[in-house]
Image: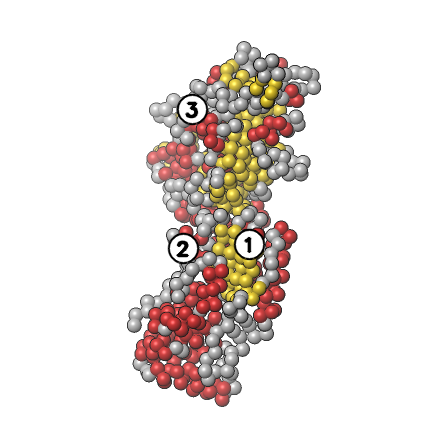
């Protein structure tokens, strides 16, 4: 489980730390407080499961003991995430960017490595005599080298497609990487990393629009166990509109009894469909896409996209979660990132959906991160956990705010959330006097007509 | 600056009163009894501690029968010692130079500020001191001012002096003759409500609603008295940067 997240120059966040994360984490705060950035940071870092080496002449320490010019402690994103989408392009698209980064500052070498020269980073400075005067950025020039294992070398080779769909890599071994970490996590490394001996890794992005003010590199690290790269489900609001990919469908078919599981879960959330069976069918017009559907006796098969947005949302969330929950066994950890679950949802279905999500993840090694603008979402979690004492210490809510682009957080545990809600306080606001709608149900004074 | 500002009160009467004073409702925490105040302060402020937040709170406390100001201050002092620990050292409560029932703690370096207001209602002629100092005492004092009394008497169809006599003398005397000592402001408010036929006139039996109406009428008709009676409350709120209009 990720316990700590440390960010430097990632998107709108100049620096920030979130500590003491729980199994279920609610990210709460005003617009532009960094909620989505955190989901994206965790997503990108967690889907980096494709092993490679990193080589930079500035960091000879990264060479391995045999003197080979790479180390094995780097990872780039998997080709596809759990939903069958390419991780970097998916995130770029969310921000209105092209899915293919044609201007990526690198090239593919003959041996299938990605060779980068990041234009905005500082070069080494030399005297006229060729003497090194000042060191440039340690990752100004670097190469990501395919996995060295001979028998899979061909398979792992990078190509032009990798180049245009990659903007992040992860280092999971900090040995010999101090210069990099100090440079790209200024003031944060090593001071904000605990010395608990937990697993830790750090991601770096050179995608300009994701670097705070376009300076240096975006960098962020985690402590604690992260997920297996193919056990990361990021359900954002686009996912409600998107159809299922074929890759996701194949993953779904690997889940024993998936149809009954999905039927049962969806039926608990949307209860006015009658007797039905969940199914996933080829899309009638879009090649390579699949479509959720419900088979109702006497009515035939109705595509889920013919239903309202709330039903579509619930169906697709639960379908993704069914696959994730099945994968998270035999020591495999998962992460479920859920952006604004309240979108499209009526209060009743939302409460049921949250309840079902809690039921699915509670006994699985799945860590949940939810961004929300809704006090109802927070209240539903508290209400559900009120009856589930064994889960109460597993929830955290992080009230977030950016001050001078520094992420400020306040960590709410169950008892804090319970107290705030009980007293009608609203943790979405930083200054309670700004609150427009007061949720406390009070008795109004009688009309005092004299 | 990240600020958390809250007012912790014992009950609904304080909420009604503060509302009438123009205090934002959603920063008032009804702890439902004095013993719950420390617990609620802890549960609500915990997330903001150790995060470089500025915390400003006011505590509105009654003085119960067996308590003294010293015992209340000592109790809150120990509570804050435990809550803040060594990470956030805080100074002691100091008595306010103008109001003897107001104590402040100003840990400016630690961004932590507390105003502890202990109820000290004005005395009422012809009633010996109540056994407890409560916010109800303030409400009762306000209810006995001339114009507020007039408004309630008029609604009940009786003369103000009749209402005054019933509340202050006749009913308490009758009770005393029957072995019942009315010695709390709340007892007298109950008599006031009954004698002014509040339950039937307003079709409501809740004392805090009555208190809210008293406060509203006090503010409207007895502006000077209202201001005088609640100046220490106003000062407690100003200490945590809340300006109220009285």
Q: Chain of mark 3?
A: A
Residue A274 image offset from top left, x and y in percent: 38, 42
Q: Residues within 10 Å of mark 1 (few under 14, many from 20)?
A: few
Up-down: is B201 above or below B60? below
Circles 1 and 2 on the same chain: no
Q: Residues within 10 Å of mark 3 (few under 14, many from 20)?
A: some
Look at the numbered disc 2 and give the secondary structure of its residue.
loop
Q: Nearer the viewer, residue A81 or B62?
A: B62
Circles 2 and 3 on the same chain: yes
Residue most toward the right? A65
Q: Chain of mark 2?
A: A
Mark identifier at residue A99: 3
Residue beneath the point at 51% across and 68% down: B98
Residue A229 image offset from top left, x and y in percent: 55, 29
Q: Are marks 1 and 2 in contact (CB under 8 Å)?
A: no
Q: Nearer the viewer, residue B156 or A235?
A: B156
Up-down: is A405 above or below A68? below
Look at the numbered disc 3 and give the secondary structure of its residue.
loop
Q: Quadrant of the C terminus of chain A?
A: bottom left
Q: Residues within 10 Å of mark 2 (few under 14, many from 20)?
A: few
Asked if residue A49 can be seen in this view, the reply is: no
Residue B99 image offset from top left, x and y in percent: 51, 69
Q: Quadrant of the N terminus of chain A?
A: top right
Q: What residue is pinned by disc 1?
A: B108
Residue A315 image offset from top left, x and y in percent: 42, 37
Residue beneath the point at 38% across and 53% down: A437
Asked if residue A184 can be seen in this view, the reply is: yes
Residue most toward the top? A110
Mark identifier at residue A438: 2
Residue beneath the point at 42% across and 58% down: B24
Look at the numbered disc 1 and give the secondary structure of its residue.
helix
């Amino acid at each position: 489980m990720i316990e700590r997240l440390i960010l430097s120059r990632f998107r709108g966040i100049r620096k920030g730390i979130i500590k003491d994360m729980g199994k279920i984490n609610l990210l709460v705060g005003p617009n532009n407080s960094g909620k989505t950035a955190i989901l994206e940071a965790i997503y990108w870092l967690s889907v980096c499961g494709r092993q490679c080496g990193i080589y930079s002449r500035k960091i000879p320490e990264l060479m391995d003991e045999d003197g080979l010019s790479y180390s094995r402690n780097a990872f780039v994103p998997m080709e596809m995430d759990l939903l069958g989408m390419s991780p970097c392009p998916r995130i770029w698209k969310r921000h209105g960017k092209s899915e293919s980064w044609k201007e990526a500052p690198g090239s593919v070498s003959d041996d299938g490595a990605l060779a980068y020269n990041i234009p905005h980073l500082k070069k080494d400075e030399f005297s006229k005599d060729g003497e090194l005067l000042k060191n440039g950025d340690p990752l100004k020039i670097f190469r990501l080298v395919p996995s060295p294992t001979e028998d899979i070398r061909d398979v792992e080779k990078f190509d032009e497609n990798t180049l245009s769909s990659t903007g992040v890599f992860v280092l999971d071994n900090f040995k010999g990487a101090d210069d990099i970490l100090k440079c790209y996590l200024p003031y944060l490394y090593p001071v904000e990393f605990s010395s608990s001996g937990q697993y830790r890794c750090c991601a770096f992005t050179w995608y300009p629009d994701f670097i705070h003010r376009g300076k240096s590199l975006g960098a962020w690290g985690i402590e604690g166990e992260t997920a297996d790269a193919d056990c990361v489900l990021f359900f954002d609001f686009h996912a409600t509109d998107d159809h299922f990919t074929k890759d996701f469908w194949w993953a779904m078919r690997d889940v024993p009894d998936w149809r009954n599981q999905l039927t049962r879960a969806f039926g608990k959330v949307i209860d006015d469909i009658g007797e039905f069976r969940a199914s996933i069918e080829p899309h009638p017009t879009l090649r390579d896409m699949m479509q959720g559907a419900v088979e109702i006796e006497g009515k035939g098969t109705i595509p889920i996209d013919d239903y309202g947005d709330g039903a579509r949302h619930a169906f697709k969330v639960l379908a993704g979660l069914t696959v994730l929950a099945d994968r998270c066994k035999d020591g495999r950890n998962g992460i479920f990132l859920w952006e604004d679950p309240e979108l499209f949802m009526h209060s009743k279905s939302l409460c049921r959906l949250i309840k079902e999500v809690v039921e699915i993840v509670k006994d699985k090694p799945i860590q949940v991160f939810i961004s929300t603008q809704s006090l109802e979402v927070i209240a539903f979690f508290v209400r559900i956990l009120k009856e589930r004492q064994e889960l109460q210490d597993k929830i955290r809510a992080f009230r977030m705010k950016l001050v001078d682009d520094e992420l400020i957080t306040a960590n709410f545990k169950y008892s804090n959330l319970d107290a705030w809600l009980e007293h009608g306080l609203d943790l979405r606001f930083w200054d309670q006097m700004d609150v427009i709608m007061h949720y406390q149900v009070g008795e109004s004074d009688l009309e005092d007509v004299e | 600056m990240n600020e958390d500002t809250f007012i912790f009160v014992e009950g609904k009467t304080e909420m009604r009163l503060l509302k009438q004073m123009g205090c934002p409702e959603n920063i008032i925490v009804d702890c439902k009894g004095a013993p719950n105040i420390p617990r609620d302060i802890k549960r609500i402020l915990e997330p903001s501690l150790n995060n470089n937040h500025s915390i400003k709170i006011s505590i509105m406390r009654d003085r119960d029968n067996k308590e003294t100001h010293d015992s209340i201050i000592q109790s809150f002092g120990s509570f804050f010692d435990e809550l803040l620990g060594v990470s956030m050292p805080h100074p002691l409560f100091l008595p306010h130079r103008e109001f003897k029932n107001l104590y402040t703690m100003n840990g400016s370096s630690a961004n932590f500020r507390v105003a502890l207001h202990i109820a000290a209602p004005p005395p009422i002629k012809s009633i010996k001191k109540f056994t407890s100092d409560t916010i109800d005492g303030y409400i009762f004092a306000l209810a006995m001012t001339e114009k507020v009394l007039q408004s309630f008497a008029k609604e009940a169809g009786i003369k103000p002096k009749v209402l005054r006599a019933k509340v202050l003398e006749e009913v308490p005397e009758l009770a005393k003759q029957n072995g019942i000592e009315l010695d709390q402001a709340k007892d007298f408010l109950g008599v006031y409500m009954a004698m002014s036929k509040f339950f039937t006139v307003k079709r409501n039996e809740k004392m805090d609603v009555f208190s809210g109406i008293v406060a509203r009428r006090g503010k409207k008709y007895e502006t000077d008295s209202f201001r005088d009676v609640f100046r220490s409350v106003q000062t407690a709120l100003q200490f945590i940067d809340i300006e109220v209009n009285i």
